[in-house]
Structure formats: C-alpha cells, structure tokens
Amino acid sequence: MYKYATSFFCVLALWNLWEVSANEVKDKAALPEPPTPYYTIDNIGEHQVHWFNYNSLRQNATLWRVYAMEKRLESQLQALQTQLDANMQSLRKQISNDMENLNRPKKSEMSAFKKVGSRYFYLETKSKKSWDAASDTCRRMGGHLANIYNEKELNEIFKGAPDYHYWVDLNSRQKRDFNFISSLTGRTAPFFKWKSNQEKVDEYCASVYDKEMIREQCADKNYFACQAEQWA
C-alpha cells in the first residue's frame, strides 16, 4: 500500500513539473522578438551615400544656375557696352559739331567779323562801353571779349584799326595784384604786351592801344574787340 502511494506522489510531482515547464515555454513563445535597431552601421552608411549624392546633385544644379546667370549678365553687359559706345560716339560727334558752330560767328553776323589766321574777330568802333558792358555785348553777339594768343595775332587784329582803346578779355579783379587773367578761362592770359610806365589805378581791366596793352579802370568807356568763340 505504501509502495503505491509513493508511486502516485512521484507521478503527481512529475506532472506538476511538466506543467510548469510547459507554461514557461508557452510564456517564452508569447514574448515578442526585440526590434532590430533602425540606425545600424549599414543603414548609416547607406544614408551617408544618399545624402552625398543628393548634395552633389544640388551643388551641380546650383552651379549650373550660377553659370547661366553669369552668361546672361555677360550678354546684357556686352549689349549695354555696345550701346554706350554708340551713344558716346554720337555724343562726341555732336559735341564736335557744336564746338565748330561755337567757334565761328553766326551767319547773320559773319560780315561783322574778320578772319585772322583760323579765328574770327570783330572790332567795335562806333559805341564805347565799360569793360562789363563790352563783355556782355560780345556774348550777345555769340562770342566773347577777345583773348589774344601771340604778338602776330595782336598785330593782325588791329592792323589798320583807328587809334582807339579797345577792351580785351584781361582783368585783375580777383586779387588786384597785376595778375591778369582771362574771364573766359579763369587762367593767366597766354600773351601780354604791356605799355611801359603806366599809371596805377584801383581796379584793372586791359585794353589795347597802338598794339600795346594798357591797364585801365574797368568802368572807363572804350571800344572793344570780340572773338567769335564762346570757348577758347
């Protein structure tokens, strides 16, 4: 009897052990597998390759757009330069024509001027004016008070002229120090031929008498010499 009871308990114990083992296996089978890491070394390397290719494509596209933009700008600049050159050439021609017109008297007044060398001059011998009024008259005629370049020109301008005093474009108003300048250019005159032993006066403008230059007060009234050029 004792023998059967021992066997029964052994079988019961083995059954319990088997059930526990089966439950452990079942529990283990029910657990999910741990996820595979997404960013593995292989995945990172693959992403780096894709990223490098993507950046290369973007860089090439950007460089192409920059190159195309440079070409368009170069073409536009070339067109602008061509147009500018054409405009400058036209402007130079126009200025040349204008200067040529300025350097000779108007046709309606051509008879009043006489040609001396390559320039034109006019001597007023009927109406005396102050230096300023004479300068204004010359400008209204399309010219300016005469600037004389050398002694030959001086002699030619006043050859056969009546013995009068003629205002020319020389004055020392700026400093009153005998530094005579041209009111047209603002520079020292290119030629002087002063009469010796002249009396000093408070304000100086220059006239020509007997082919010599005289210092006089600018308010004095004299005849005058005009040149056709407005610029010289």
Image (cartoon, helix red, strand yellow):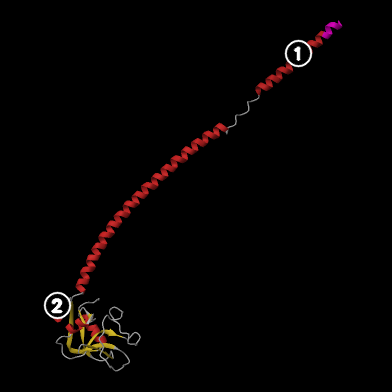
Is 51 located above or below residue 18 in the figure? below
Per the image, the residue denoted by label 1 is 15
Q: Which mark is residue 64?
A: none
Mostly what secondary structure, the magenta segment? helix
- The residue located at (20%, 69%) in the rendering is 97
Q: Quadrant of residue 102?
A: bottom left
Query: Left of 216 or right of it: where is 4?
Result: right
Along the viewing direction, whichever of 59 and 211 lies nearer the viewer: 211
* Label 1 environment density (alpha carbons within 10 Å; few <14, some 14–19, many ≥20): few
Q: Position of residue 100 (x, y in %)?
A: 20, 71
Q: Position of residue 87 (x, y in %)?
A: 26, 61
Residue found at the far right of this picture: 2
Q: Position of residue 20 (x, y in %)?
A: 74, 18
Is 170 located above or below residue 42 in the figure? below
Helix or strand or loop: what does disc 1 sit on? helix
How many marks do you count on the picture? 2
- The residue located at (31%, 51%) in the rendering is 75
Q: Position of residue 167 (x, y in %)?
A: 23, 87
Q: What residue span does the magenta drawing correspond to?
A: 1-6
- The residue located at (83%, 6%) in the rendering is 4
Query: Left of 32 or right of it: where is 129?
Result: left
Q: Quadrant of residue 198?
A: bottom left
Query: Which mark sits nearer the N-terminus, 2 or 1?
Result: 1
Amino acid type, mark 1: Trp
Judge whether residue 44 is colored magenta.
no
* Label 2 environment density (alpha carbons within 10 Å; few <14, some 14–19, many ≥20): few
Residue found at the far top of this picture: 1
Judge whether residue 5 is colored magenta.
yes
Q: Which mark is residue 108?
A: 2
